[in-house]
Amino acid sequence: MFGRMMVSPILQLGRGADLQSAVSALLQAADQIDNVHWIEFPNSVMLFRLVPGDPESGATYILDRNTGTWYSVDFDDKQYGGYSMGQLEELLKECRFLELAERPRLWRTGFSWWVESGEWPEARV
């Protein structure tokens, strides 16, 4: 599980968008999804969201506060249906994913980032 991180811009709000408006815009773009986990950083906001009634449907979204862009984050791990809360906990604790989530400029550099259990995130050319 996990591996190469794939980041896709999904919603551009522009610089200076307030957090309430940014979250509302994401809620409108992704119907019937509940916020389950929310972490705020000075440069970003990470949301983990689930489809109600499906505990294996979790998706991670990150708002780059500097550009006002929401990104969808996924991994090249053949986990197509989404992730559970337990998998999110592993991602946050064992893979040190917050090191990347709080610094969007790192994954906008053009490098491929790899996230593996028990290791620091690694940039590869």
Image (spheres, helix red, strand yellow):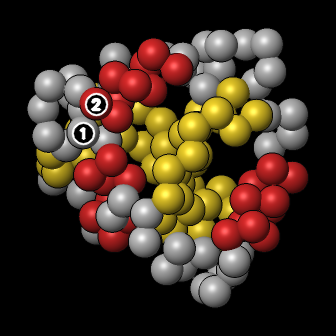
* Front in this rendered view, residue 115 or 86: 86
- Which residue is pictured at 87% across the width and 39% down the height? 31
Report the side of 115 relative to 75 (left or right): left
* Front in this rendered view, residue 57 or 35: 35
In the rendered image, residue 54, in percent from the top left (x then y), is placed at 73, 13
- Which residue is pictured at 36% across the width and 59% down the height? 102
Q: Is residue 95 above or below residue 81?
A: below
Q: Quadrant of the N terminus?
A: top left
- Which residue is pictured at 34% across the width and 70% down the height? 105
Q: Residues within 10 Å of mark 2 (few under 14, many from 20)?
A: few
Q: Is residue 60 above or below residue 86?
A: below
Q: Which residue is mark 1?
A: 96
Amino acid carrying label 1: it is Arg
- Which residue is pictured at 80% across the width and 61% down the height? 25
Q: Which residue is mark 2?
A: 93
Report the side of 92 relative to 39 (left or right): left
